[in-house]
Structures are given as structure tokens and as C-alpha cells.
Image (cartoon, grey):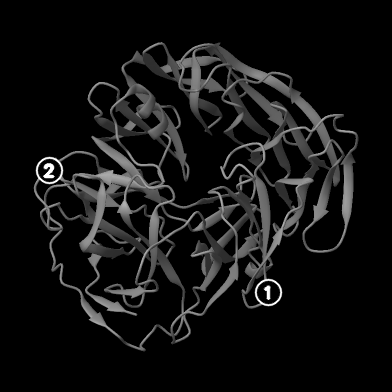
Amino acid sequence: MPTFHLLSMSTVKLTAMSTAFLLISACGGGGGSTNITETNSSTWPSSGSYEVVLKPSGSLTANPIQMSLSLVHASTPETEYQIDTSSAATQLGESLNQGQWNPTKGQFTDLQNTAYVDNRNGTVRVTLLQANGSRPTQWTAPAADLCGTSQLARNFSKPFASQLIVDTPGVDGLCNTSDDGQILVTFSDVGVPSISTVSSKYRYLGYLRSPTTGQPTHWLVTWKNGGQIELWSIDQPGTTPIESSVSTVTPQFSSVANLSDLILYTQDGLLKAMRMVNGTPSISNVSALSGTSGWKLAGNDATHAYAYFSSGASTSCTGTWRITSVSRSAASANTLATGTGSLVAATTLNGAVYGTVCSGSTGSLIKVDTTTGNQTVLKAPSSTIYTASSLSGALAVTGISSINGSWSLSFLDPSDNLIYDAGNAMVYGTNETTYETSSNTFTGDSVYVVPQTLAGGMLRRWDVASSTMITVGTLPTATDLGGTAGNLVFASPLNPSSLLGGTFVARISSDTQIQTSDSRVYTLLPKASKSLVLTTKQVK
């Protein structure tokens, strides 16, 4: 999984978009005993849902990384419920959730965790997250090697009716190559996983949701041998051909965007769109242009999706880039903006696409109006690479210096005016209280922030609704964790529910090894200030 080593220009450009795991080097605070009282207890919460805490170990640069699973619960925030007593390599981690459907807003709210799906020691594993007074039940099914990419068609009314597609390495033994395969993971009514190998003739590209129920209805499946493109029903038998005689040779397909009523994908590098228009599926060509970096999603709004590519590699900072606007309801697409250099990241919010452009040895941040296509330069070309992120309705701009690796983080209002300067800090995660079906993403009302430097270890929460920064607590220093001042500190990402969040913090040794001795697990209450709690008990 990616980490934040901020040295070269190419590293800066790539890590600026990554929030999988964060390295912080923090001084100050982090009090509390590092001695955890281990309890072999049969006392487990009897109701409510657990939250997942992932605990990596071993080499920080390993791929895949070694991981163990623990749980925390809102009724006992001082307790870590340890599921795994040893780490294992994993390439998969997905949650199944239950929620209430709001058809007016197109949202699932009041989300509750049902199960966590990962892979461990040659199996796909399901851990039930609904507390019932005993150790959570786990189910497994044997699985071959997996890649780190997956598509989860979540069913929020019946979580175990969800279906999961996971990529697998092909005959070359490598992931992300043209011969990759796929498996389909389904679940019984109680969560037992079942694995089916997808025929090498087919490729799952994405899924659609019902505008009435919000639940997934169909997979978009292509025939890789030049046959046809079809919709396969998820909840009942049935196949709907959409396009036949795709190619006389073996085409290459890849997924770009997975929205409720629109799937963007590429065929031999060319961008195509599959829409549902008045209940009828339709495929249209979006653009005959492509580049080395391939097409990527720049975000969406209620009426359009936005995709971009660079003619050269995204790290080359040469060539040209293009943003395309794709209508979600009609077979139309238009070039929204073009420019020179490479577009290395983009997001959409408040009627604009915000794009990170690198050209030569400098980077800039631009704003493109989604109606007019007019371009505005928000951050002039410099040695600092700026990326904009749309986080639960907040616009956060992160800057990373290609000279010394220093960070900056600021929050802007809808008119792009500065409303808060978080200084040398980074985004740590967001809470996940709502699922937006129009974009197939989780949203909430909080963005978590940690320092990137030795100047302090404060965990803070940006409240989106009130535009205020709230102190959550102080993370430990390297010396608190048994190291020396200046050592790196590792913190796992924070994506709490409406009830509770949890994180794992450990020291990094000079040889990039995660030191599990003296490591800690913390919990926090998402709506409260100064709510960071060090767990002092383990239940196994």
C-alpha cells in the first residue's frame, strides 16, 4: 500500500493523490500507558456494530503489506477486540453495510456495519460485525492469488446480497496486465462466501443501480474475444445484449467510472459510455483520443461525469491533457478543456473541475467551469504540487514541495476563498455516515487532519457544516512508542461511522519496519471534541 516518502518530483505527484496509509512524525502529547492489559475474556458487546481497525506489521514497503484485524465498539471505547493474533498478507478489504434508503436525495443513511471481507492465507474471509454477546463469527472460502483491485456492488437493504468482483493475476503471475482474470464473490443469507472464477472470455466492467430502490441491478460484462457487450442481472436470471460484433480481434477493456446510471470504460484505450436512458441501455463512443496514462475519472455532478487523460505518462509533465464532459442522460460528450503538460489529478465540486497540472519541472492548480469550460489558475506554476480534493462537500487543497517535501493544507469556500489554513498538515480520512448512489461514494460531515512535521501531533477534525476545526486529541510521539525523537510514526487511516472510529499507531524503525511492540490502538467519538481514547484492554 502506498506511503508518503516525499523526495523526488515524480514521487510527489503520485503520493499527493494517495490516502491509503499515512506517515506522520509527531511531537507532543500522546499520553497514557503503553502497557495493555490482555484479557482472555468471553465478554463481548451484545448489540450494535463493531468498527474495523487494521494493524499492519513488517516492512512498510512490502507488497502486499502484512495485516492483522482488530475491532472496536462504541459501548467500550477503551477496549480493543483482537481478531487476529498474527499478521498475514492481504490484497482485499471491503465492508458490507446496512442503510435506510432516501429516494428523494438518492442516499442511504443510518449506515450500520454488517461484515468485513478480506483475504488471508489463501482464503476470502468474512467477519460478521453485528455484536451479539460472543466472539464474531467468521466464514472463509478458498481463493487463489488476488490483485488489489475490486468492484463491490453493495446492497444496503440486504448486505449479503452484495456481489464482489476481484481481479486476479493471469498466467504471467502479475497484476494490472492484459491477461488478468477475475473472480466473483457472493454470499449466503448468513454471510458465507462463495467464489466463482469468471471465464477468461468475459470481463466485468461495472454495475448500475435502480433509481427506485438504490440497489445494484446489473453488471456490465464484455466478451474479451471480440463478441458482444451485455448487461447481466444481479438479482434475477437474465442477460441483455447491448452491442454485438465489438471487434474482429481481441479487444482490451478497463473500467474508468462506476456511477448509478452511467458506466465509463475503455475499449483498446478509447473512452466509451454505457447509459440507462428511460430504462433502456445504450452505448456510445465518447472520445477517439487516449494517451499513455489512460482515461481517469475527474468526478461527477447531477448531470455529467468528467474524465481526463494525458497524451504522455502522467509523470512525464509533457504533451497535452484533455477533460471530457459526459452527459449522464443522453448520448453526448464534449471536450471541456485542454492544455499542455500532464494532468495528474482532478476532482469535481461546486460546478467546477479542479485539476493538478505539471509541466516541465513545475506544477499548477487550475479550475475549469463545468458549464463554460473557462479555465482559472488557482495556484500559479511553482515547485510545489497542489491537489484539490472534494471531501464530503469540503474543498481541501494540499501542497507538497518537490524541493523539501513540506506539506500545506487549506480549506476553501465555494468561491475558492481561503476559510482555514491548516498549515503543514495532511488529510487523515473522513467519516462515512451516508452513501451517495449518484457517485457510489461514502460521505459524511467531517474531514480528519494530522500534522506532517515534527511541530506537533494533534489529531483534528474539520467540521464541514460549520467550517470549523475541532481538536480530537494528541497522537503519541516516537519516544512514547519506544523510539527516539525524530523517528517516523505510522497511523492507519481514519474513516469512522456516526458512532465510533479507531486507528492504529506505531513507530517506524530506520529500516522501514513497522514496530508492533509499544504500538497503540485509539478510539474516538466522531461528534465530540477531545474524544481520543487510548485502549487499555484487549479481548481475544
Marker disc for residue 111? none
Quadrant in which residue 248 is drawn = top right
On the image, the x and y values in percent for residue 81 come to 35, 75
Quadrant in which residue 159 is drawn = bottom right
Does residue 93 lie above or below 452 as drawn?
below
Q: Secondary structure at mark 2?
A: loop
Look at 82% across and 35% down and name the residue there.
283
User: Neighbour class for label 2 at 10 Å: few (<14), some, many (≥20)?
Assistant: some
On the image, the x and y values in percent for residue 93 come to 50, 58
Quadrant in which residue 222 is drawn = top right
List the residue tagged with mark 2: 486
Q: Are marks 1 and 2 in contact (CB under 8 Å)?
A: no
206 horizontally vs 49: left or right: right
102 horizontally vs 211: left or right: left
Q: Decide which of 330, 270 is in the foreground and name it.
A: 270
- Earlier in the chain: of badge 1 and badge 2, it is 1
Q: Decide which of 191, 299 is in the foreground and name it.
A: 191
Q: Secondary structure at mark 1?
A: loop
Marker disc for residue 188? 1
119 horizontally vs 264: left or right: left
Q: Amino acid at mark 1?
A: Ser
